[in-house]
Image (cartoon, rainbow, N blue to C red):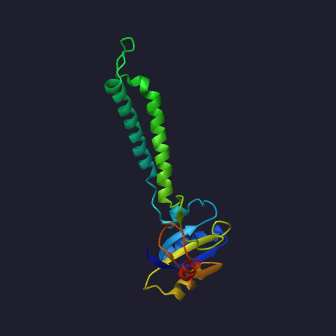
Amino acid sequence: MAIKKFAVAAYDDEDVLFPAVSKVRRSGYKMHDVYTPFPVHGLDVAMGLKETDLHIAGFIYGLCGTSTAVGFISWIYTIDWKINYGGKPHFSLPAWIPITFELTVLFAAVGMVLTFCYLNQIMPGVKKHVFHPRQSDDLFILTLELNNHTSEADAIAFLKSTGAKETSIQMAEESWWYGRWDKKEEYEALNA
């Protein structure tokens, strides 16, 4: 995976974070992410993130559950295990509604949870770089992705001008990875 350089800024108040995010978007810096200790209403709009398509995935998973239930039950009762229940029809869709509903909900729920975990990179075994030890405690962390044309000193000065309490330059993986660091020296060399 690619190792990239990031400028990291720590803010202690969300009222300072919102104008900083707006300034970053206007300035042309590439915002990597914002880490907050609790959900901040409106931050996704301020960052310019598009609305999630998770509801579409849930609908598709629900359709898979419905088709699995109807297909499997109809195959059992019309082909594999035909039983004559006092002259009642073999293909009795109203009798299958409860199990069809349950499988629809099960497929949609499990599929959406797994998709949510994948998209947000929070699956078991996933390792992500922690930009600041207090990013999930009481600080708001804004990270900028620096490229070869971006000056580190300019990025740090810009972040300090937005009201950042702490700033730093860090090297990190650009996304998530599975596994663990086998040697402590590798991890320390990455963040030196």
Most extreme residue toward the front is 182
Q: Does residue 27 show up?
A: no
Residue at 58% x, 74% y: name it: 131
The N terminus, quarter of image: bottom left
Q: Is residue 153 above or below residue 120?
A: below
Which residue lies at the image location 45% right of the left edge and 38% below the top edge? 104
Which quarter of the image is occupied by the C terminus?
A: bottom right
Q: Residue 169 location in percent, x, y?
A: 56, 82
Q: Is residue 107 above or below residue 42?
A: above
The answer to whether residue 155 is seen in the rendering is yes
Residue 173 spot, x, y in % from top left: 49, 74
User: Where's residue 144, x and y in %?
Assistant: 51, 76
Q: Residue 44 in the image: x percent, y percent? A: 52, 62
Identify the residue at horizontal 60%, vertical 61% (top origin). 40
Name which quarter of the figure residue 43 lies in. Answer: bottom right
Q: Nearer the viewer, residue 32 or 174?
A: 174
Q: Nearer the viewer, residue 110 or 180?
A: 180
Depicted 2 relative to depicted 116: above or below = below
Residue at 58% x, 67% y: name it. 35
